[in-house]
Image (cartoon, rainbow, N blue to C red):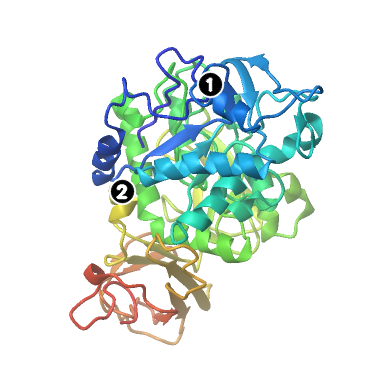
Amino acid sequence: MLDLFWFGPDVKGHLGNLEWDLDSFPQPERMMAGLKEKGVNTVLITEPFILKGTGKYQEVLDKGLVGLDASGKPYHYDFYFGNTTLLDLFKPEARDWFWEIYKKHTLSGVDGWWGDLGEPERHPDDMIHVNGRGDEVHNLYGHIWAKTIFDGYAKDFPSRRPMILMRSGFVGSQRYGMIPWTGDVNRTWGGLKPQVELSLSMGLQGLAYMHSDLGGFAGNYKDAELYTRWLQYGVFQPVYRTHAQEDVPAEPVFWDEDTKDIVRRYIKLRYALMPYNYTLLYENAVKGTPMMRPLFYVDDNPALLENTTTYLWGDDFLVTPVTDKGATTQKVHLPENADWFNYWTGEAFEGGREIEVPVDIDNIPVFVKIGAFIPMVPPFQSTKDYGSSKLILHYYHDTSVGQSEGYMYEDDGHTKEAYLTREYELLKFSAEYKKEASHQRHAGGVRLPGPAGAQRYRAGGAQCAGKAPLGWEEICERVGRSFPSADDKNESGARDGFGCG
């Protein structure tokens, strides 16, 4: 990710132009096309404030598109960026006008939209909107803004999935594909600490993509340990995205070698987990299940209602971010619905208890459920390069689990609502342990050594069934209709990868 925000040559006085600054970006279409070839999609930040004297100011006044004062005149007021008006997005004609600007830039190569300051950040209580005063409709503003972009895509780009990043919304905003974040969080340990609780709470309310600016946004506190811990946690939050004011760099490349080495390893893990993570997104789309889940989802222990330090990433990962500077141990509650392996060491733990885990800067506590299937792929550089032709299926075997099931969802990554048109695949995995078996079979997979009772098996290659030792039988079943991809098929037309061809 390349993180750049540009409000003009001197920051203030430019909101409302809603056009490229050609002095700084003389060939925006060519620039975006070149970035896309490198796997970088362009997401532009927009705000609903039209400052006095900017390019669109007279137009929105002439067309009556802004909020009014008590006398019926355009409401002007001062805030950080200058003297401004505010689009009345509750008016259909204002939404139509705003969408035409989005449409023009989308046609020129923009791939996503970021709605900032959309609470609105400065919203006079006595401003008159078409449906009420500012203090009556304030909380709905970001919601209707997201709807504006979502509806525009549905009308003019019906086959495309809209990317809509918004700082503000309302109950039900997930229906418009909103990706919210926790705002301009302080770049401090105090800023990191509440992030799990915020995402868990919002996920339970339906806004499952809630996430934070990794590394923190505001302030000039530069701490490699804090930055590392935040980006380690980010592997197991819905969106992996750094964003910061210019005081401290957001991108890993600007940090010291030790920090880069650790963060690089975690970023690779994030990419390698794409099949597992994409399945979580599918579950959210069709069931509303959040990706980050509180422990009481699976453990009916009233005390866990207060646990905001450990959470489930999907069904099979248990994560406890490190949020204290200099921590050497971390308490982890293991839910009683399963037993757990330490993801890094392979050590097995019984569920239903709290343990204390030693930590160093290299890792945060991550556990994987015994009996889980974790589909992964080798790390790659960009989501445009993602494919499952080299799928690696990890099975976390222990003799205490007699039967196990799992699955993986996949589509082309672009088609809107692919699951409704059956342009997708479900690969189903199941395992049954036969204790009477005395021989080991291991066809087409690779055994990953680990401590006794913590055996992982990896099956790969173009096959449907992978056999693991100790009598395990794994079966995968394709459901749905394979999406078309000429370079993702072998000569017989069957899908390459760990699937049923």
- For image coordinates 45% across by 26% down, the residue present is 225
Residue 92: name its quadrant: top right
Q: How many marks?
A: 2
Three-letter code, disc 1: Ala
Residue 259: name its quadrant: top left
- Residue 40: x %, y % from top left: 31, 42
Q: Is residue 353 visible?
A: yes
Q: Is residue 237 above or below residue 63?
A: below
Q: Is residue 361 above or below residue 345?
A: above
- Residue 468: x %, y % from top left: 35, 76
Q: Quadrant of the N terminus?
A: top left
| Front-most of residues 212 and 69 | 69
- Residue 217: x %, y % from top left: 51, 25
Disc number at residue 218? 1
Mark 2 / mark 1, whichever is N-terminal = 1
- For image coordinates 53% across by 30% down, the residue present is 327
Mark 2 neighbour class, 10 Å CA radius: few under 14, some 14 to 19, many 20 or more: few
